[in-house]
Amino acid sequence: MDVGAAPGRTCDACGTAALTPFSDFGDIPVETGLHFATEREALVSPVGRVVLGYCPECAYVRNLAFDDALVDPAAPTDMNLYHSPTFRAFCSELIGDLAARLPLAGQQVLEIGSAQGEFLRELCQVAGCTGVGYDASYAGPEGPDPSGADLRRGPAPLAGDLPPFDVLVSRFVLEHVADPFGFLARLRTLAGDRQVVAHIQVPDAGYDLSTAGWEVIYPHVSYLNESALCRIATRAGWRVERTGALFSGLIRYVEVSTGPVSTVDIAEARNRQVAAIANFDARHHAERERWRETIRRLADDGARPVLWGAGSRGVQLLNYADSDRRLTAVVDVNPAKWGRYLPVTGHRVDEPATLAGQDVRAVIITNPVYRNEIGKALADLGIAADLAVA
């Protein structure tokens, strides 16, 4: 593990301890959510180095080698998961829970990172609120629509004319921000003296760093478990009201308010995360090698192995374990990816229906939450394949 050259940095979450390097990933794809029109473009897409460092005080983790200049915030990325019935059902269930617990009726919601607006539209309809959503990747009509949502293309103008808000929602944004403490502190300043509540979600580093780490991707600057997320929120001036895990443990959320800041006990979560970090590097690199050998064996045995899922986790697995492209195919349910090529390795993405009749006997997935959905889809296609979770 070559981490000796990683620069020192004070923890972004607690602001006290220096971050200690613990895992060097080397160079990995930068644009995990960008899919290319030609194989040649994909093969020459940029790579960036990942060197993970952790805070012994709160267990915050950051890529110490992150270079903000490599990431284009205006790139036409497509990470839309709404083509999955499993993900849609999760979002609807979450919206129902938020509408039941939070004072949303008649309130103005600000969503930072609203993607294509599906979540905000449904939230407005179910909870009886209005909302403004910002996202650089938004591709639909801008402005208000009948749902009560007003969707805008571009980053939220945190330094400029941001509309007033009663409720803040931010899902899968904080981990991408180069200055996560500054981001949360600025939002707390903008909330002012109003009674504001916020629901913030990130990939749960408590899951990612205790497993293979496929969600460690270049666009993610920070990796936040329960202890780090609570610590950075309180340091930024928010009062932590509630935290928990969602989506079978893959997502961590924190709900905060503009009430008086109080101390949050993070010791147990910190200790659990530090223990996972201690053997993460060996576990991650062992998983890389295991899946390289598994794909080679399946291909050599004539099982015609396929990867189902061309999201960030899939891109990482391909980069580590199938750079020589032994897989028969890569498929995804998102039509926007069909016929396009994945960064660095150049794998082409196809529609799942193309697998019918190809004698596929092994299908690999990288997210266990989708196992039942994918198993049913395979059965519907008449494919009797072994389903393995990487």
Image: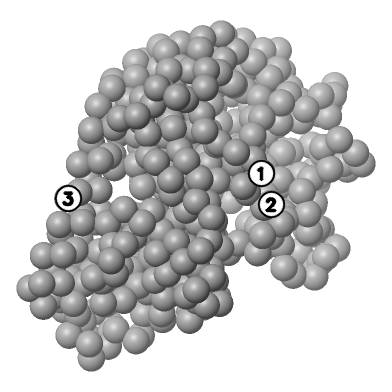
Quarter of the figure with the N terminus: top left
Local SS, label 2 = loop
> Which residue corresponds to mark 3?
290
Is 104 on the left-hand or right-hand side of 213? right
Q: Earlier in the sequence, mark 3 or mark 1?
A: 1
Residue 36: where, in percent of width, then height?
Answer: 54, 71
Residue 262 appearing in the image = yes
Front-most of residues 250 and 154? 154
Q: Residue extending furthest right?
A: 161
- Specify the quadrant of the image occupied by residue 68: top right
- Specify the quadrant of the image occupied by residue 108: top right
**Front tag of 3 and 1:** 1
Residue at 35%, 72% in the rendered image: 330
> Which residue corresponds to mark 1?
69
Q: Amino acid at mark 1?
A: Ala
Front-most of residues 74 and 103? 74
Q: Compared to 81, does 326 lie above or below? A: below
Q: Amino acid at mark 2?
A: Pro
Residue at 26%, 71% in the rendered image: 327
Q: Compared to 44, does 263 lie above or below? A: above
Local SS, label 1 = helix
Q: Compared to 175, does 358 lie above or below? A: below
Local SS, label 3 = helix
Point out which mark residue 131 bears. Answer: none
> Which residue corresponds to mark 2?
73
Q: CA distance from mark 2 to mark 3?
A: 34 Å
Q: Residue extending furthest left?
A: 301
